[in-house]
Amino acid sequence: MEREHLIKPVLDHYYPTIEYGKGVFLYDDQGKAYLDASSGAVTVSIGHGAQEIIDAMLEQANKVSFVYRSQFTSEPAEKLAKKLSDLAPGHDYWAFFVNSGSEATETAMKVAIQHWQEKGRLGKNRVISRRMSYHGITMGALSMSGHVLRRRRFIPLLEDFPVVVPPYCYRCPLNKTYPECKLACADDLDTAIKRIGAEHIAAFIAEPIIGAAGGAVVPPEGYYKKIKEICERHEILFIADEVMTGIARTGAMFGMEHFDVEPDLMALGKGMSAGYTPMAAALVKDHVMEPILQGSKSIMSGHTYSANPQSAAVSLAVLDYIDKHQLVLAAEEKGSYLLARLRQMAEQIEMIGDVRGIGLLLAMEFVSDRSNKLTFPPGLGVTSRVIERAFQKGLLVYPAAGGVDGAGDAIIVAPPLTITEEEIDLLVSMLEETVREVMQEVTGYEWGEIG
């Protein structure tokens, strides 16, 4: 057998070779079709093979693909920055373009810290996140993440940033019940700030809806209003990590719109280019930029490909496609239909403990006992079993953590926003068959009894 040269996620695992994609389907070199119910990594929001995007790529490539941002600007980058500000809540954001969601959250962190440096408050250099969180795989982004498994290998190199409890009502980490709890999970941020000292905290970062670290966990009503009030009272910036939720995925252009809160900074990625090019951004409000404009007049961050015109043109085309095909509305309507179908399915399958989400960012959490929400032993690998069995059937779903400690099992179901009701019915049928088969494998077995 010929040796391999490409480093893949699991080195001894076989990965089929995809030849092409169209709409919500991918096709491998053996002719097998896969229904992409996860949009890749919750990325391909407009589906595969959209001709308008391909045309925009070619048009820009025929002009110029790259200029270095320290030497030139470009029309696509300027237009994209304005477009994002026009779409964002408050319409008063600057844009710093990068290549991935990890870079976007880390850039937002750097800008937040620099904001306070420019104001002479050098001690405000820590970021608070939540225990159930994942903000990226770079060292800075991982330092802001509470995801134990992703952090474990690099702990000696990471900043020891503080974390607070997540708004996870299905398994409240404070053993309280909404609304009698009076949003105690939000108050945990206030407690942490008082313990550490606001003079040491630059920002608080959170996903509007918790993604891979929890599986489409939606906070209770009033949570983000209280979070923003706490941040403002203590003079701490609020960073919304919209990498997964942003750009129409949840039935709104930005996830924070559901909660009527304007973040001081936002991180975008994934759906910003819908997988057609590496592209992400940190959006920064005017008031955050103001001391930098009055001071050093330069953001101390950047990457070679930042703001390249090729990627900017593609992202503009994606935004135009979303608008033309009314995909914000589609995410809301198709999401409601899919959520209802998944909940019908859950009523019939004891292993499904919870179905949740907004728009087309949905998830289901698996439990060994629905009455007490008991998680499966990690050794059973229930999430992996579901994903692998679905894959064999030609259905792609995305892994997520479940349980307060992240050791539980969940999957994200987040198909392209272009999916039809007929395709949703097929998705649900394939997923139900998958989950029933896995349930037969794992139900009634104790730790270690299943190979």
Image (spheres, rainbow, N blue to C red):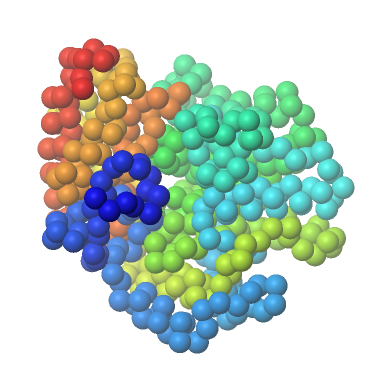
Question: Residue 312, position in %: x, y?
Answer: 51, 72
Question: Where's residue 20, x and y in %?
Answer: 24, 66
Q: Is residue 136 above or below residue 58?
A: above
How many numbered badges does the structure rendering display? 0
Q: In this orientation, does residue 415 appear?
A: no
What quarter of the picture does the C terminus occupy? top left
Q: Residue furthest bottom?
A: 63
Q: Residue at x 23, y 12 (%)?
A: 446
The quadrant holding residue 403 is top left
Is 116 or 160 nearer to us in this picture? 160
| Residue sitting at x 37%, y 74% | 53
- Residue 230 is left or right of residue 371, and the answer is right
Residue 421's place in the image compared with 62, above or below, is: above
Based on the displayed image, in which of its 4 quarters is residue 293 positioned? Answer: bottom right
Left or right: 36 in relation to 118: left
Residue 232: where, in percent of width, then height?
70, 41
User: Height in image: 307 above or below 152?
Assistant: below
Q: Going 18% across and 38% down the picture, which residue do you hit?
A: 389
Task: Pick out the residue farthest to the right.
Answer: 120
Q: Report whether 440 appears left or right of 228.
A: left
Q: Position of residue 282 (x, y in %)?
A: 60, 57
Q: Residue furthest top?
A: 446
Q: Quadrant of residue 5?
A: bottom left
* The one of 357 and 279 positioned closer to us in this rendering: 279
Give me the residue at 20% from left, 19% from top.
450
In screen coordinates, is 224 left or right of 291? Answer: left
Q: Nearer the viewer, residue 375 or 221?
A: 375
Residue 377 versus residue 246 in the image, above or below = above
Whether residue 32 is visible to the viewer of this picture, yes or no, is yes
